[in-house]
Image (cartoon, coloured by chain):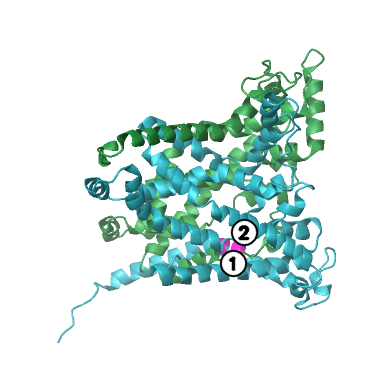
Chain colours: A cyan, B green
Amino acid sequence: MQLARQNNRTITGEILRLKQNTQMILLSIPLILLIFAFNYLPLFGWIYAFFNFKPGVPLAKSPFVGLKNFGMLFTTSQQDIIRVMGNTLAISFLIILCSPLPAIFAIMLNDLKGNKFKRVVQTVATLPNFISWVIVFSLFFSVFSSSGAINTIIFKINPSANTLNILGNAGIAWFVQLAIFIWKSVGWNAIIYLAAITSIDPELYDAASIDGAGKLSAIRHVTIPGIIETFFVLLLLTFSGILSSGLEQFLMFMNPVVQDKLEVLDYYVYRLGVTLNDVSFSTAIGIMKTFISVGLLFGVNFLSKKVRGNSLI
Amino acid sequence: MNSRYNSRYNSLMEKGMDKINIIIMILSLIVFLYPLYYVLIYSISDPSLSKASMFILPVGFSLEVYKSVFKLANLGNAFLMSALRTVLGTAITLFCSSLLAFMVTQKYFVIRKFVYRFLVITMYFNAGLIPWYLNMVNLGLKNSFLVYILPTAMNAFYVILIKTFIELLPKALEESAQLDGAGFFKVFSRIIFPMCGPIIATIALFSAVGQWNSWMDTYFFVTNQKLFTLQYVLYKFLSEAEALNDAMRNSNALLGHTAVAMTPESLKMGVTMVVTIPILIVYPSLQKYFVKGVALGSVKG
């Protein structure tokens, strides 16, 4: 049996392909170099974790200490690490606890009548996501300050009240940062859910109403199942990023009073490496964090495959 | 639309829920807008009056704060730096990311799979803060404008978005161009790139906002005042008393003895507003592109 020709390969076609491939490879070299330079090259910095590096002494002349820096995580720096991990996990778990909020906001927003009002709310709610943490800090610093808006309102209600110190209070620090984080992100995250809601088949709602469902029932039986998939994916992704808190927020809001409570892993690594110049230990922590994060991501992906049948990545 | 809900049941309760929804939405509008509003009224208030009782209306009215802000020596240059990095950085990111994305979609590209995996794997690991810092210094990017452009030029996420989008374009376009013997770059620039309008617009906006808001690269790598960006100048005002005091001294000297006395807080408010206003102006009209982009992105993701 004669096999039909699978592709129309001709000599001239092949020459063209060769020419194009050469062009493309040449053009892609600088791009590949860029990827390499800013993603793979930094990995060579991991070598600092295995030496006792002090700025000023070149690496070649520094003493090799092997895994000592990693061991320090469990011995000399154990108190620090426990405190820092506690802060990081507490804040991350609080964020996870609040993860239904964008979905709830999206459902409520979607249910609004009046398209103009809807769009105004959507624009306003998503705006905080697009201003930098520097500006966010400036805004809340002034609103929360001792003569700022919050205290002004408190004094109007109760002239003999004490001044409320919000950003300099260690006890509520986690919750204040949580609230500010939600202020900045809930509107934008709701957009993702809105996209999911609008892709729900309207016939499902018609069927529900024929079955006698009121608004709440419809939300419970149509809307929520429609977005639960999205919610689950986002939840797992958030969980896999549990060790990362983001340096920007904490660089801005850190002060000596709340440091014990707000020093998260990312900030601790920064303080050790940049402020205290303990490059080796800081790098070692960074390496551990990367491995645990990758492990979490694959673990979460595996879980997703088992439970839902699809993988996340 | 209310008609999809069965109106026989509890229409009174549903009307009640609608009203509560509206109230909650209005409350959330206030919550989202108030911090910005407060800073705004502070910045147009008379700097010499006490702000202790202010929360809805400004106390007095004065544009002295803005006069001082615009006289600050480094603000104009910082604005230029921010604008330059936004435009150039976004252009380069778009060009590099879309070029690579296109190359990766061409099935005859021999190293296609390698390039794509090489790129995507970078999303799963992070070398850490110190290695990142040392790497940038070793690459000679300290105090260089390139530190704003090069690191963000290749972005795995954007490449994936564009690649997915290109793969959804009708094949006929590409094939008809290739029949005409067009080189790959011609196909890319004349046919594919123009067709990617929506996704390019979305990525351009994300990239531009990222560039405009970026300040940590300045913080870590730039000591040359000429390269300071707007966000970083604001950061310095907020965190370093020295920067603020210098500005105060300059503003009092420039305004002369007839002027209203400036306070550090008022100055901070003024700078905050000036740094925020560009986003406020641009965002509402571009918001729909962001939203469309998320819809596009979530189709894949």
* Numbered circle sitting on residue A293: 1
Q: Residue at x 49, y 47 (%)?
A: A101
Q: How crowded is mark 2: few (under 14 residues within 10 Å), some or many (20 or more)?
A: some
Marks 1 and 2: CB-CB under 8 Å? yes
Q: Nearer the viewer, residue B164 or A27?
A: B164
For marks 1 and 2, the one nearer the N-term is 2
Q: Which residue is drawn at 59% across and 28% down?
A: B37
Residue type at the position of mark 2:
Ser
- In the rendered image, the quadrant that contains the C terminus of chain B is bottom left
- Looking at the rendered structure, the number of numbered marks drawn on it comes to 2
* Residue B34 visible to an observer of this rendering: yes
Residue type at the position of mark 1:
Ser
Q: Residue under label 2, please give it.
A: A244
Residue A32 to residue B219: above or below: below
State the residue lying farthest toward the top. B258
Q: Position of residue B117 (x, y in %)?
A: 48, 69
Q: Give the range drawn in magenta.
A: A34-39
Q: Main secondary structure of the magenta part?
A: helix
Query: Is residue A115 covered in magenta?
Result: no
Q: Which chain carries label 1?
A: A
The answer to whether residue A15 is left or right of residue A49 is left
Residue B289 to residue B46: above or below: below
Q: Kindly state the secondary structure of the residue where label 2 is placed.
A: loop
- In the rendered image, the quadrant that contains the N terminus of chain B is top left
Residue A233 to residue B277: above or below: below
